[in-house]
Image (tube, grey):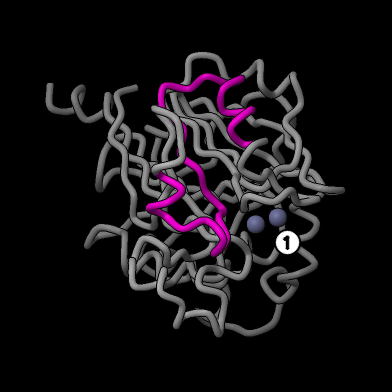
Amino acid sequence: MANKEAKSKMVVTVLGCGTSVGAPMIGMQGLPQFKNPKNWRLRASLLLEPAGRGGPAVLVDTSPDFRQQALQFFPKMPRLDAILLTHTHADHLHGLDDIRPFNFVQKEALPLYAEPQALEDVRTKFSYIFQPTQEGGGKPRLSLHPVQEKPFRLTACADPFLHHLEIIPLPLVHGTVSCLGFRLGPIAYLTDCSYIPPTTIAKMQGLELLILDCLRPKPHSTHLHVDLALDYARKIGARKTVFTHMGFELEYEAFKKSLPRGMVPAYDGMQFRLSR
Ligand SMILES: [Zn+2]
Ligand SMILES: [Zn+2]
């Protein structure tokens, strides 16, 4: 019974909701808005715990702030079972080396899921991981798993509970590069996009929670700006929409007040408990 109850829960934690330089950008920390901790934003990342807090965990993106995010927001006995990578821009990938403590504790390689081209980028950018150099505990232990357009299951995870979960990849356009969003049950995470194809929108019926890119008020070539993000949010029609990947231009309180019902800006450490 207790087990059944645990399986019905999903905890989602926003580990970071900032744009690529974070907020404040270096040098801006003296601005009045940064007296509010909700305007301090680490780089964008999400933690999904499909069986409730302290159960198996799926990390979306290894941001350059990953170590700090894990220290700050993970439970005392953290566990990591899989990494989903949206794309390979530095602000979503460059904390990859900091998964090593999970390798030490769990004594297993971590599966990383991404598009085939993104996996190639990982092999290039982190070539030392895949070369026979540097013995000892100095390198992350990873297994790489290509994601195609079809839904997939996390069958490479050590925890068999995760083998039953279906992840739906959500192809996005991010300027001139592709990026993946992910849907897990009632939740969809769409960071870094400038256009959401209709075929992707069709895969987001009946969402409880949509976490969506929203960089700043002014249009941008590779990200959604406020008006466009609101248009997509209405079109997708999730019960709740949370905006992420925000720059310093979006002051938390003012932005929150400006938003329609059911839409809010994220803040680092924001958490949701949902039933699956
Ligand atoms: Zn980004
Ligand atoms: Zn990006």
Element carrying mark 1: helix
190 or 8, which lies in front? Answer: 190
List the residue tagged with mark 1.
Answer: 122
Q: Nearer the viewer, residue 180 or 192?
A: 192
Task: Provide residue 255's location: percent of width, then percent of height.
Answer: 46, 48
Q: Is residue 88 above or below residue 167?
A: below
The span picked out in magenta is: 229-256
Mark 1 surroundings: few (<14), some (14-19) or many (≥20) residues within 10 A: many
Number of marks in the image?
1
Ligand 2 under 8 Å from disc 1 Cβ: no
Residue 62 in view of the camera:
no
The quarter of the rendering in which ligand 1 is drawn is bottom right
Viewer-proximal residue among 272 and 10 = 272
Q: Quadrant of the N terminus?
A: top left
Image quadrant in which you'd find residue 200: top right
Please name whichever residue, 243 or 249, is drawn nearer the observer in this view of the structure: 249
- Three-letter amino acid code at disc 1? Val
- Whether residue 80 sits left or right of residue 131 in the image: it is left
Above/below status of 244 relative to 207: below
Q: Is residue 249 magenta?
A: yes
The residue shown at (35%, 44%) is 56
Q: Position of residue 32 (x, y in %)?
A: 40, 74
Q: What residue is drawn where x is 18% and y is 24%?
A: 5
* Residue 135, visible in the rendered structure: yes
- Which residue occupies 63% across, 24% down? 151
**In what quadrant of the picture does the C terminus appear?**
top left
- Whether residue 80 is in magenta: the answer is no
In the visual, does 256 lie left or right of 127? left
Which residue is drawn at the image coordinates 42% and 67% (left, top)? 40
From the top left corner, tell me how far across and down residue 21 is, in percent.
61, 70
- The spot of residue 74 in percent (x, y) is 31, 59
